[in-house]
Amino acid sequence: EVQLVESGGGLVQPGGSLRLSCAASGFRLSDYWMSWVRQAPGKGLEWVANIHQYGSEKYYVDSVKGRFTISRDNANNSLHLQMNSLRIEDTAVYYCARDRDRLDPWGQGTLVTVSS
Amino acid sequence: ETLMTQSPATLSLSPGERATLSCRASQSVNSNLAWYQQKPGQAPRLLIYGASTRATGIPARFSGSGSGTEFTLTISSLQSEDFAVYYCQQYNDWPPWTFGQGTKVEIK
């Protein structure tokens, strides 16, 4: 069964940092691009970043450029999102998803709350 | 950046009725469009990709159509489990991938 499980969310103060992880199983991570997508409370979906199979290309939405870094460890079937200089507006559930242009499947999400 | 606009924001229908959801792109995305379903407290689930191809395990009552800038998701006969929020996403022009704001299908 193809499965993605996120972890690492929590409560952090504005300006703080957090590192999210996504554990993949049931498929070979190195065969796929991977994405992070977020959803603020009560809001819609916003794509955040994605990464090439071997990490050679990375793309970000403008609002996180210079603050977030996506990375992957294919040997350990894991995807990561390092989030620095967090803002209140970064509060959201963060999902990882296998990226074949369409996003499928998605993990269950991890909640990041930025608040003082 | 390609902007995606969905309509209506909310659709109030009864079980057994037909649901028609619309998605419009600010520029042509060819057939590079996906639809997702999201239920409360759950992650989104892929329904349709390539504008009209059902994802694995998706019932035949879900169908997608359109190309270019105008797209439609149709649910032929609403079941109780279909009441949810639906999002369209374009993957023609990136970065970024962009989503519509969602259409909530609620029980009338």
Image (cartoon, coloured by chain):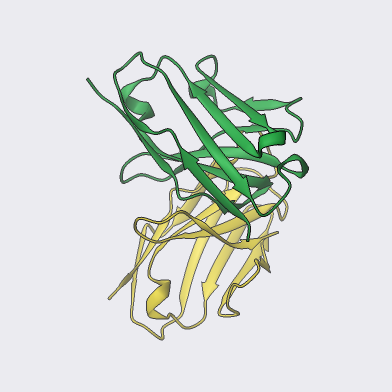
Chain colours: A green, B yellow
Looking at this view, name the residue that lies furthest to the left: A116
| Residue at the image point whose x is 33% and y is 81% from the top | B14
| Residue at the image point whose x is 66% and y is 36% from the top | A76
Q: Is residue B20 left or right of residue A113?
A: right
A51 or B104, which lies in front?
Answer: A51
Q: Quadrant of the N terminus of chain A?
A: bottom right
Q: Is residue A106 left or right of residue B79?
A: right
| Residue at the image point whose x is 35% and y is 13% from the top | A15
| Residue A94 image-quadrant placement | top left
Where B61 sits versus A96, above or below?
below
A20 or B81, which lies in front?
Answer: A20
Where B103 sits versus A66, above or below?
below
Counting the numbered discs, the total is 0
| Residue at the image point whose x is 73% and y is 27% from the top | A55
Q: Quadrant of the C terminus of chain A?
A: top left
Looking at this view, name the residue that lies furthest to the bottom: B16
Where B6 sits versus A23, above or below?
below
Residue A113, position as x, y percentages in the image:
31, 31
B92 or A74, which lies in front?
Answer: A74
| Residue A105 image-quadrant placement | bottom right
Residue A54, position as x, y percentages in the image:
76, 31
Q: Is residue A77 visible?
A: yes
